[in-house]
């Protein structure tokens, strides 16, 4: 199957490229050619006039089924929200709920231009099934909380996910191991997970230093900062690690992360809404740490539109530094694309528009009052565009949304399923 996108403004997000008008040829699941003018025959032609083509966005930290808990308990502190609301609700979730909640998030992500995401949750088989069906690309992790003895059941589920799904769905699914956070993972089980990840050559996905309370708890328990605790457990020695949040890091903590494989998912909307603080994004980047962007679950953030994260990320750093020149448009766009792809360990496949990479791209409709005139495309992509401006979403060469119509998800059925399930889950909480 050959698809030719014609006469479109191409934003490759490669370091050396600047936006230019041209054509994109997709053959099978890869980008075959990118050029100012292509004359190839194609099975399908897409008129890109008035559109911008850019790499699909990479959401580096998600809990997809939490879409079912969206708006259920807002305006709480993280630990109250988690312990009193989310955990009891999650105990009520069936595997089918997880499947439909994950699909709801995927519908929203495809609609707002996300093509790849990293997910940490429970009942991962159902999430993987939803990924296989919707056509998205994902790095999946069974979240591991070690506060009570479960006879090794969670760990078995984590390994089952890896065995069943790593490299599956045409290579769109990869897997990681997911010790949830320093405050839910005591030293012994944490070290066991690290050893296993090393033996199995698997990346690790973990929350880090999200709140001041976390810093206090870890200080009381271990007389260390959360970053020190992970460093001394050996997490940053060999493994590729995806750290979610990393809000409360001091200068020494940033030093521990320096040189690590992987990096940090910055989740500014969730951090703002939960009042967590402002992550030292610019300081981390200046130390060579890779920083991508994520939304966290919609149970906390409500929105999983990555264009909102893009805006929040740059606004917050400008405000924090009192300097509008920090985190300029191009840099924050790279965080949402190629830097995120590096965090998911898929930058050989995604994150830029390049010949030979997988065809994961989006078309943005610029024929709208808020996106005209176009002086600088990259500026408008950051400060003007929102998820509803995405016209077409393509993953692995397959069109998942065209003219804003989802092609792999039946939304009518989806909405029926989620409204009934969401009500049942929160009853009596
Ligand atoms: C055991 S699966 C993952 C686990 O993480 C919880 N969660 C969702 N958002 C956050 C967050 O911002 N910080 C910490 N933990 C979070 C989710 O409810 C699941 O229980
Ligand atoms: Zn999270």
Image: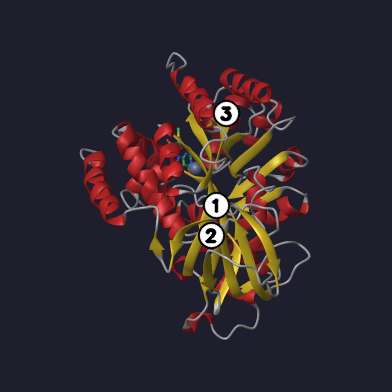
- Say which residue appears at 69% left-offset and 44% top-offset: 250
Q: Which of marks 1 and 3 is nearer the N terminus?
A: 3
Instruction: Answer left or right for 356 relative to 394.
Output: right
Direction top: furthest residue: 151
Q: Which mark is residue 162?
A: none
- Say which residue appears at 64% left-offset and 83% top-offset: 375
Element under disc 3: helix
Q: Where is residue 173 in the image (x, y as percent from the top left)?
A: 54, 39
| Residue named by callout 3 | 220
Q: Which of marks 3 and 2 is nearer the N terminus?
A: 3
Q: Earlier in the sequence, mark 1 or mark 2?
A: 1
Please say if the residues under marks 1 and 2 sit with CB atoms less than 8 Å apart. Answer: yes
Q: In this view, does 232 lie above or below 268?
A: above
Q: Position of residue 321 (x, y in %)?
A: 68, 64
Q: The N terminus appears in which quarter of the rendering?
A: bottom right
Q: The C terminus appears in which quarter of the rendering?
A: top left
Q: Residue 309 carries which label?
A: 2
Q: In this view, does 381 lie above or below 336?
A: below
| Residue named by callout 1 | 267
**How far is disc 3 from disc 2 in space, using C-alphas?**
33 Å
Element under disc 1: loop
Q: In which quarter of the image is residue 258?
A: top right
Tell me: is circle 1 under 8 Å from ligand 2: yes
Looking at the image, which is closer to me, 64 or 365?
Answer: 365
Looking at the image, which is closer to me, 276 or 292?
Answer: 292
Looking at the image, which is closer to me, 315 or 218?
Answer: 315
Q: In this view, does 190 lie above or below 133?
A: above
Q: In this view, does 65 lie above or below 224?
A: below
């Amino acid at each position: 199957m050959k698809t030719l996108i014609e006469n479109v403004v191409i934003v490759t997000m490669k370091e050396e490229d600047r936006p230019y008008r041209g054509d994109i040829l997709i053959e099978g699941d890869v980008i075959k050619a990118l050029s100012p003018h292509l004359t190839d025959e194609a099975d399908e032609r897409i008129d890109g006039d008035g559109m911008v083509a850019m790499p699909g966005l990479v959401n580096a930290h998600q809990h997809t089924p939490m879409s079912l808990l969206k708006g259920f308990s807002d305006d709480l502190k993280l630990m109250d929200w988690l312990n009193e609301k989310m955990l009891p609700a999650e105990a009520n979730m069936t595997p089918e709920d997880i499947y439909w909640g994950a699909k709801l998030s995927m519908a929203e992500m495809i609609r707002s231009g996300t093509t790849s995401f990293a997910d940490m949750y429970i009942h991962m088989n159902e999430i993987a099934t939803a990924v296989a069906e919707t056509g998205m690309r994902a790095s999946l992790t069974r979240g591991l909380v070690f506060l009570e003895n479960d006879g090794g059941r969670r760990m078995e589920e984590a390994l089952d996910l890896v065995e069943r799904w790593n490299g599956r769905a045409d290579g769109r699914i990869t897997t990681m191991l997911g010790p949830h956070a320093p405050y839910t993972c005591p030293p012994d089980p944490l070290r066991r997970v690290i050893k296993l990840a090393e033996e199995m050559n698997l990346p690790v996905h973990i929350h880090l230093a999200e709140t001041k309370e976390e810093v206090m708890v870890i200080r009381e328990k271990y007389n260390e900062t959360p970053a020190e605790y992970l460093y001394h457990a050996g997490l940053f020695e060999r493994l590729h690690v995806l750290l979610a949040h990393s809000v409360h890091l001091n200068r020494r903590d940033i030093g521990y992360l320096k040189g690590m494989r992987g990096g940090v998912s910055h989740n500014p909307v969730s951090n703002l809404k939960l009042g967590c603080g402002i992550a030292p994004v610019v300081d981390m980047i200046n130390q060579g740490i890779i920083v991508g962007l994520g939304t966290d679950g919609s149970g906390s953030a409500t929105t999983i539109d990555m264009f909102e994260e893009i805006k929040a990320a740059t606004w917050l750093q400008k405000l924090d530094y009192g300097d509008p020149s920090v985190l300029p448009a191009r840099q924050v766009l790279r965080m949402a694309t190629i830097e995120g792809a590096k965090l998911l360990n898929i930058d050989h496949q995604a994150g830029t528009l390049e010949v030979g990479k997988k065809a994961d791209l989006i078309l943005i409709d610029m024929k709208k009052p808020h996106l005209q005139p176009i002086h600088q495309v990259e500026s408008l992509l950051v400060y003007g565009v929102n998820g509803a401006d995405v016209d077409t979403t393509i993953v692995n060469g397959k069109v998942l949304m065209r003219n804003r119509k989802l092609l792999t998800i039946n939304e009518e059925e989806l909405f029926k399923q989620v409204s009934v399930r969401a009500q049942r889950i929160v009853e009596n909480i």
